[in-house]
Amino acid sequence: MSVDSVAAHLPFALSLLHAMAAQYPGLQKPQRSSNLCENCHLNPKYKEGRKTHPYCSKSCAEANAGGNSSNSDCDFCHSRLKHPGHPFCGKACAKKAAAGQTASSKSPPSTCKAPGCQKAVHTKPGGTCGEYCSLSHKTLTETLCILCLRNPKKANSHFCGRHCSHDAERKGPMILEVPAGHVTFKSVADQFKASWRHPGTTCPQVKRVYKVILTPASSQAYENYKSSVEARGQFVAAGSSKGNENRRWHGTRRECLLGDNGQTQFCTSTTCSLCCILRTSFDVTKAAWGSFGQGIYTSSTSSKSNDFSRNVPKSPMKAILLNKVVVGKGCKMSHANKTLTAPPSGCDSVLAEGGGIVYDELIVFSNDAIRPSFLVMYEV
């Protein structure tokens, strides 16, 4: 094609390009404007009250920052864009940061504590985060069957029904961890705190609670003993529990790390008192002779039983047992009697209190008068 021919067609080509540009504005180079987003240059800048942000949206802000949202989000709330040239979105967040406050959104929201739920926790008015995604999951977690962790437990039981109850008994002896938000966890932890009575000491925090699952034979022997004590004393008619059953603390020697970080396997040491008690319950023949003879000693005072809780291996936690004890008719004694091998005639137990005894003790002399109910792990 000659030069003259190209020149002849040039006006037509330019006219065609101009028409296409007018029909498809995306082919034109956008004109920069102070009111357009500094990243896409297409949409107006985002306005928040009197403030105008440099970008139209968070996506453009993140894109301009190389995908790192921390460069564009407010350094305090992490939910709104920074004011141009400042680390915060506005004066409110700047003042809160200067005052040393923390924002609930400063770290990613945690997940719901309900077993199996991966949803984010509910954010309360004011920005604080809860522990569950919804009220229904909170209620469910507080009352879950501690074996299947799926269905609500039955009233006056730790299980949702006979299937889980029998399944747990078949697997016993063992311990089952109770979820931290469970009503049972709260009941045990509250008793531990309320019964910590030593002055000048701070009650340690309960970290884990385990339900002790006994064998059917062990449970039945205890129930039979309780029924016989009830038949003699008629405690229910007097407004007490059957057999005058109470929960009492017992501290003992631990040679392993049972209870630490979810460890539920009993050790095989014959001198690890904790595992021996959990496996076969208490044995009065192995009990040491104390101020009130050879019996099984417990207390309503958690801080007293804490004095007897000993770790052989180093551990950041200590172990204590909360037990079911058939008190029956207790004989109150305020002075030591180291020769006792049974309660005084007509009584079922010894209540050591008053006189020179600073903190109470309950002593039983029958193996079937007591069973471990909960293993409680707390800070050293």
Image: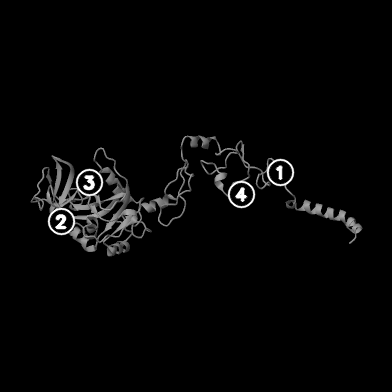
Q: Earlier in the sequence, mark 4 or mark 1?
A: 1
Gap between marks 2 and 4, in whole Å?
73 Å
Q: Position of residue 118 (x, y in %)?
A: 45, 55
Indicate the position of residue 372 as horizontal and vertical percent values: 23, 55
Q: Are marks 3 and 4 in contact (CB under 8 Å)?
A: no
- Residue under pointer 1: 32
Label 3 belongs to which residue?
307
Q: CA distance from mark 3 to mark 1?
A: 76 Å
Of residue 258 and residue 372, the one placed in the foreground of this image is 258
Q: Mark 4 — residue?
A: 63
- Element type where label 3 sits in the image: loop
Q: Reading the chain from its start, which is encountered first: label 2 or label 3?
A: 2
Residue 270 can be seen, yes or no: yes
Mark 4–mark 1 Cα distance, whole angstroms, equals: 18 Å
Looking at the rendered structure, the secondary structure element under dot 1 is loop
> How much space separates mark 2 and mark 1, taking CA atoms?
90 Å
Mark 3 neighbour class, 10 Å CA radius: few under 14, some 14 to 19, many 20 or more: few
Q: Amino acid at mark 3?
A: Asp
Earlier sequence position, callout 2 versus callout 4: 4
At label 2, which amino acid type do we have?
Answer: Val
